[in-house]
Image: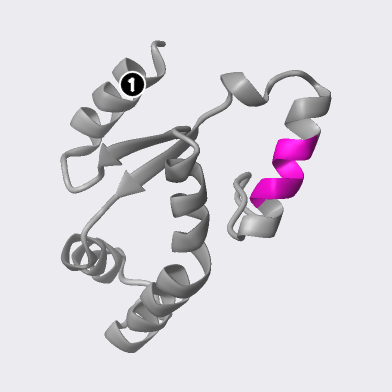
Amino acid sequence: MTDGSPRSVWEAEALDVFLEFLDRKKHTRALFLNVSEHVVTERLLARGRADDHKEAIAGRFAFFKEHVMPTVEYYKHQGRLVEINGDQSAEKVHEDIVNAMGL
């Protein structure tokens, strides 16, 4: 796992075993910030980092679609996915997260 979230289905399944042990699985949801490729590309290019160029970004999207989206689908199938429109402003995304998570 990286960034505090499972990126593969086997990591999600392993986390679920641990959460069941803690009796927390039914209370745990996955948060998915759904951002379009166009918006992500614009945002990454605007950062100005040397590794943020169109070819590298396209490679990251390919990795995400192949390796991470099955995990998103895993949580969606279980009814534990909270999907937020990440194309919005940071303020609106924050507001939607707070509301969706009941904070």
| Vertical arrangement, residue 49 with respect to residue 68, above or below | below
Residue beneath disc 1? 100
Give the magenta range: 12-17
| Vertical arrangement, residue 9 with respect to residue 77, above or below | below
- Tell me the amino acid under the disc marked 1: Ala
Q: Is residue 60 magenta?
A: no
Residue at (60%, 50%) from the top-left corner? 3
Residue nearer the viewer, 80 or 40:
80
Q: Position of residue 59 (x, y in %)?
A: 41, 83
Residue nearer the viewer, 38 or 90:
38
Residue nearer the viewer, 23 or 78:
78
Query: Does 58 sit left or right of 60 as displayed?
Result: left
Residue at (17%, 67%) from the top-left corner? 38
Residue at (69%, 57%) from the top-left corner? 10
**Image quarter of the C terminus:** top left
Q: Position of residue 67 (x, y in %)?
A: 52, 69
Classified by dominant secondary structure, the portion drawn in magenta counts as: helix
Q: Position of residue 102 (x, y in %)?
A: 39, 11
Query: Does 33 sit left or right of 95 as displayed?
Result: right
Residue closest to the far bottom: 55
